[in-house]
Image: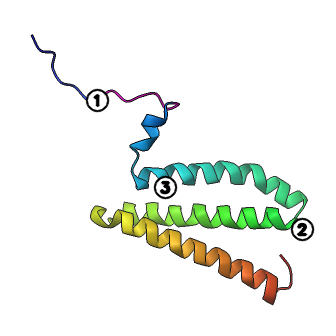
Amino acid sequence: MDTPAGPPVRPPFWDLRAWRSMYPGMWAWVLQRLSAVVLLVLFPFHVLNPYKAWLRAAVLALVILHGMHGLKVILTDFGFPARHQRKLLWALTAMGVAGFFWLAYLRKVTWGFF
C-alpha cells in the first residue's frame, strides 16, 4: 500500500538546503528584517559618535536598503503585478545603490565631510 503524498518535508533552517530554495522576494524580506535589527544596534553608536565615517556609511547603506525593500512591500500591497516582482526588486536595488553613491558623493564634495 502506497503512502499518500503530502507536502515536501523542508529541512531545518540551519541546513543550507533550506536557504537555497528561497525566492528573491523572500531574500528581500529577510534582508529588510536583518537591516532593521542591525540599524537598531548601530543607531545608538551613531548618535553617540556621529563623526566616524564608516559608521555613517553603514547607517546610510542600511537605511537605503531598508527603505527600498519597504517601498517594494508597499507597492506589492497596493497590487503591483506578481509577474513583475523580480524586476521591481532589481530596479529598486539599483536605485538604492545609485542613491547611496549619490548621497555619499554629496556628503563628501558638497557638504565637505564624510
In the foreground, 18 or 112: 18
Who's the residue at 82% across and 53% down the image? 44
Who's the residue at 59% across and 78% down the image? 98
Q: Quadrant of the N terminus?
A: top left
Query: Do callouts 1 and 2 mark residues in contact (Cβ within 8 Å)?
Result: no
Who's the residue at 70% across and 79% down the image? 103
Q: Position of residue 64 (x, y in %)?
A: 62, 67
Q: Please give the residue where the numbered disc 3 appears in the rendered image.
A: 28
Q: Residue 70 carries which label?
A: none
Q: Give the residue type that dot 2 points to.
A: Tyr
Q: Please give the residue where the numbered disc 1 appears in the rendered image.
A: 8
Q: Give the residue type that dot 3 points to.
A: Ala
Residue 78 seen in render: no
Q: Please give the residue where the numbered disc 2 appears in the rendered image.
A: 51
Q: Which of marks 1 and 2 is in front?
A: 1
The kind of secondary structure element at disc 3 is helix
Alpha-carbon distance for marks 2 and 3?
30 Å
Magenta range? 8-14
Left or right for 88, reference 7: right
Q: Would you call the spot at circle 1 few (<14 residues within 10 Å), some (14-19), or many (20 or more)? A: few
Q: Where is residue 11 in the image (x, y as percent from the top left)?
A: 41, 28
Q: Quadrant of the C terminus?
A: bottom right
Q: Which of marks 1 and 3 is in front?
A: 1
Q: Would you call the spot at circle 3 few (<14 residues within 10 Å), some (14-19), or many (20 or more)? A: many
In the foreground, 88 or 18: 18
The kind of secondary structure element at disc 2 is loop
Q: Position of residue 92 (x, y in %)?
A: 49, 70
Which corner quadrant of the image does residue 17 belong to?
Answer: top left
